[in-house]
Image (tube, grey):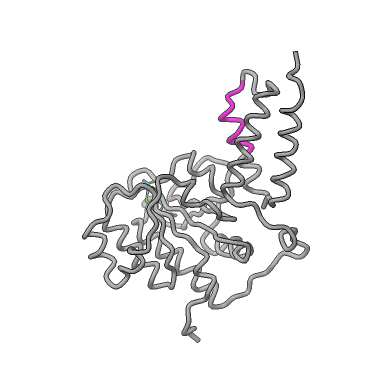
């Protein structure tokens, strides 16, 4: 049976397009979203926008374009989100958990009552950078022909939005028993950033990085924290530890 209304949780899903080159793809993505009942489009530094090409391709979804939020970087687009997935046509050699669309939808819907979630789409020619992936809790890969794996950007948006609609129409969100975030609020993306900066400074103060490249160490630590459903209370504890380190006299 088809549902006549749009599940309200669709309003908590941000679709983020990073550095899109072709405005037609932005319009087509807006259309794909509206077809599935999503409306919150974020555009990180689009190459050519606003544009009539976007309007033409959006057809009846011009309202999604009109309400799109244009931001200067990915931090701003995912600020306040409790969970973020980065999408990729390639299975990268990074340690991030790789999810197929259905797994991604289930995992993220367990958290959606706590705040916004975001699905981030990369550039047409080069996808997402590793720095951008560091902002993501998981990598979402749509299984495709391995010899021709890259979907058109708006087609990828379509698949993901369809999966959210389908799941929310047949809602069976299985909250993990005893899951800690039934009680504690999950940390938001910007709070995680604040924690990473603090951790970096405290470890640097300790002389912990030594001859190691601090970016590499921080990348691994972000991978660890991104998998852990970190709560706001846990962020406070880590930051408290960092402050305690910084309050100590520097060792000779
Ligand atoms: N040459 C780029 C392809 C980019 S396609 C690369 O190798 O990464 C543009 C965007 O569409 C990607 O960044 C991703 O967001 C999305 N996309 C395309 N195919 C996808 C797939 N199979 N799974 C998940 N996302 C995909």
Q: Nearer the viewer, residue 94 or 118?
A: 118
Tell me which corner region of the image, top left, top right, bottom left or bottom right, holds residue 197: top right
Outermost residue to the bottom: 1
Q: Residue at x 68, y 21 (%)?
A: 207
Residue name at image x 37 percent, y 53 percent: 70
Up-down: is 237 above or below 108? above
On the rendered structure, is 86 left or right of 217? left
Quadrant assignment, res 117: bottom right
Is the C terminus in the top left, top right, bottom left or bottom right quadrant? top right
Q: Position of residue 201 (x, y in %)?
A: 63, 29
**Can you give x and y, in whole percent of width and height, for residue 94 in the image?**
54, 40
Residue 157 vs residue 138: left or right? left
Q: Which residues are magenta?
A: 212-221
Coordinates of residue 67 in the picture (x, y in percent)? 37, 63
Q: Is 216 within the magenta? A: yes
Q: Residue at x 54, y 42 (%)?
A: 134
User: Which residue does the image show at 35% across and 60% down from the upper left?
Assistant: 154
Which of 188/151 is in front? 188
Magenta segment includes 20: no
How many marks the image carries: the answer is: 0
Question: Can you name the residue that lies furthest to the top here?
Answer: 252
State the predominant SS element of the stretch in magenta: helix
State whether residue 144 is above or below residue 124: below
Position in image of residue 27 (x %, y %): 30, 62
Q: Quadrant of residue 59?
A: bottom left
Please give left or right for residue 139 compared with residue 239 in the image.
left
């Amino acid at each position: 049976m088809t549902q006549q209304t749009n599940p309200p949780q669709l309003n908590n899903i941000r679709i983020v397009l990073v550095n899109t080159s072709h405005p037609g793809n932005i319009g087509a993505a807006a259309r794909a979203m509206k077809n599935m009942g999503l409306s919150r489009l974020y555009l990180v530094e689009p190459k050519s926008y606003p544009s009539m090409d976007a309007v033409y391709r959006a057809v009846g979804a011009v309202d999604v374009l009109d309400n799109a939020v244009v931001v200067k970087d990915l931090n701003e687009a995912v600020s306040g989100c409790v969970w973020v997935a980065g999408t990729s046509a390639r299975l990268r050699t990074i340690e991030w958990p790789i999810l197929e669309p259905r797994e991604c939808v289930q995992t993220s819907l367990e958290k959606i009552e706590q705040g916004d979630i975001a699905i981030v789409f990369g550039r047409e020619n080069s996808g997402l950078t590793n720095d951008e992936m560091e902002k993501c809790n998981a990598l979402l890969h749509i299984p495709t022909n391995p010899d021709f794996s890259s979907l058109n950007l708006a087609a990828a948006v379509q698949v993901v939005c369809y999966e959210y609609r389908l799941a929310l129409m047949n809602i069976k969100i299985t909250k993990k028993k005893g899951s800690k975030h039934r009680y504690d609020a999950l940390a938001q993306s910007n709070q995680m950033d604040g924690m990473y900066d603090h951790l970096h400074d405290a470890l640097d103060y300790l002389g912990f990085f030594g001859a190691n490249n601090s970016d590499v160490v921080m990348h691994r630590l972000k991978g660890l924290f991104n998998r852990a459903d970190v709560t706001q209370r846990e962020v406070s504890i880590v930051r408290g530890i960092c402050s305690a380190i910084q309050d100590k006299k520097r060792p000779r």
